[in-house]
Amino acid sequence: MYNMSKKLELKKISKYDLEIIVKWRNDPKIMKYNRQFFLLNMKHQLRWFNDLSKKDSEQRMFVFKYNGNTIGVGGLIHLDKKNRSAEVSIILGETKLQHRGLGTMALQLLINYAFQKLKLHRIEAEIFEYNKISVKLFERLNFKREAILKDSLWRNGRWWNVYIFSIIND
């Protein structure tokens, strides 16, 4: 556990969390913002959980607990220990709690964990052009847009750009 406030905290993912994570990741309102292009099932999630649990895993994933309730999932993927970098991933699954600052707090918790606990130098994020809320969130927390992958994503009958954002631990 890595606690930033009394209300929101990171907790290690358990098998009990997998069912809600599948539900969130298959929700069309959430799925449109992820690279995932097929519906997940518990078999997929168990395989992911088992990979995540390995000592040499390139991921550090957590659930976000708000006042004791699980409200989201996120973490660091493509963890590169040699170059001290990773990509951040965040889903606030309880959509009724969105737009209350919890996404900002959750992302800040992950940044703090990455820079303070893991001693990373760089964190990056991949954000779809149409995900204006995430663009604002990452800019608010001092991520800089450093690249545009032109026409990199096919969604809703058209091509979209994908932005690469990063933050460096100075």
Image: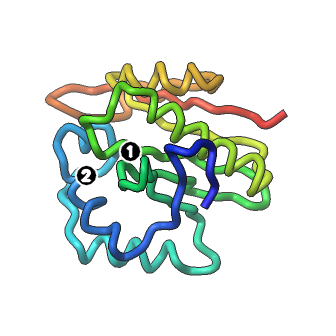
SS at badge 1: strand
Residue 138 in sight in this render: yes
Question: Looking at the picture, does residue 128 appear above or below residue 8?
Answer: above
Question: Looking at the picture, does residue 131 appear above or below residue 125?
Answer: above
Q: Residue at x 42, y 73 (%)?
A: 14
Could you say where residue 31 lies in the image, as x and y percent from the top left?
A: 25, 44
Q: Residue at x 56, y 80 (%)?
A: 54
Q: Which mark is residue 91?
A: 1
Q: Nearer the viewer, residue 61 or 80?
A: 61
Q: Quadrant of the C terminus?
A: top right
Q: Nearer the viewer, residue 144 or 115?
A: 115
Asked if labels 2 and 1 touch by Cβ distance under 8 angstroms, the answer is yes
What is the total number of numbered labels drawn onto the structure image? 2
Q: Is residue 152 left or right of residue 6?
A: left
Which residue in the structure is indicated by mark 2? 24
Could you say where residue 134 lies in the image, as x and y percent from the top left?
A: 43, 27
Say which amino acid is labelled 2: Trp
Q: Quadrant of the N terminus?
A: bottom right
For label 2, the crowd category at 10 Å Cα-Cα, with few meaning under 14, some 14 to 19 and many 20 or more, is many
